[in-house]
Image (spheres, rainbow, N blue to C red):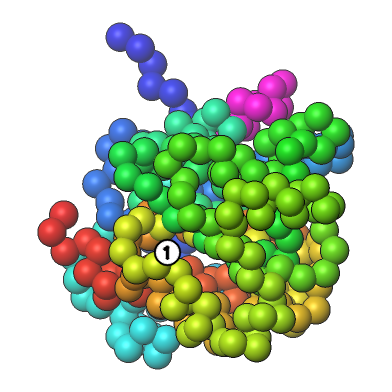
Amino acid sequence: MTVKEKLTETPRGGRGFLGFPINTDLDNLDAHIAVLGVPYGLPYTPDDLSNDQSRAPDLLREKAQDAGWSEPRTIKHFDWDLGGPILDNRDVRVVDCGNVTADFQNPREHYRRAEAAAKKIFQSGALGGDHGIPIPIMRALPTDEPITLIQIDAHMDWRDNVNGERDGYSSPIRRASELPFVKDIFQIGLRGVGSGREEEMEAALNYGANLISAYEMHEIGMEAVLKRIPDGGRFYITVDADGMDPTVMPAVNAPTPGGLTWLQIRKFVHGIVKKGRVLGIDLVEISPSFEKGNITFVHAERLLCNFIGAAVRANYFESE
Ligand SMILES: [Mn+2]
């Protein structure tokens, strides 16, 4: 008999996201929606080993707007963003799978565990971590049908490597483009200056990535952006907090003016779940040191609430 590998551990504070139950036994999940914290990426420098972003998954749970209340209000009460309680009184089960465990002797081990955990749980709502996190998560996606990748980000993230590291936070879209089941790529909110140079721009264009700058998005509106994304099929969404405007999510390493507003990201979330099957969403690159009040975490919580509530109302979990 083999001992079961402990891929995740209970979040600090012991409260699941929004008060949903915690289950770190990934072989016995019995859930429609699973939340997974993935704190650690792969370092470009020794400082990155445990970076600021590593604290975000636990803080997002702990800073929940109803954290001071004796009952999980966010789950139970009427939600005006959704027109009713988040799960619409349907038989939909959400669990928090805790945080992927780390091996500090071997940073790469964390990615292996994240991929193994994500394989066990897909559909996931994954909470990063830095923007390297989607790499193991996307590698765990089901491979039997093509998947459209949608990234909300100020940056392209097409670097082949940085300091020799190929799986770090500047490379998630490059690595995704190499996955055989990833088909169309849409990158929304691009602006300012990031790690990308002209050669990354060329690589993205050669692939056929649909690059939609923040300024184009503001010009034509989110409705028109959604129309460009073909209906049907499967989607995976990765949200870098710096894709949002810094007035909405100030707690990022690279605040860049001109990002998505709250109303735009909400419209995007509700629109995309109606187009096809969103297999998972991740939210990464929240750097708690730069938080102003609680504004980033409030928007982060609302974003994931809107995603869960919209997926429930799109009948994702009816026949399961
Ligand atoms: Mn970014």
Number of marks in picture: 1
Left or right: where does residue 177 sit relative to residue 42? left
Q: Left of 12 or right of it: where is 231?
A: left
Q: Which residues are magenta?
A: 99-110
Q: Quadrant of the C terminus?
A: bottom left
Q: Is residue 229 visible?
A: yes
Amino acid type for the residue under numbered disc 1: Gly
Q: Which residue is mark 1?
A: 19
Front residue of this view, candidates 114 and 215? 215
Residue 104 in magenta?
Answer: yes
For the residue pair 299 and 101, the one nearer the viewer reads as 299
Residue at the farthest left position: 319
In the image, is the residue at mark 1 within 8 Å of ligand 1 by its beta carbon? no
Above or below, 135 relative to 290: above
Helix, strand or loop for disc 1: helix
Q: Say which residue appears at 63% left-offset and 81% top-offset.
A: 217
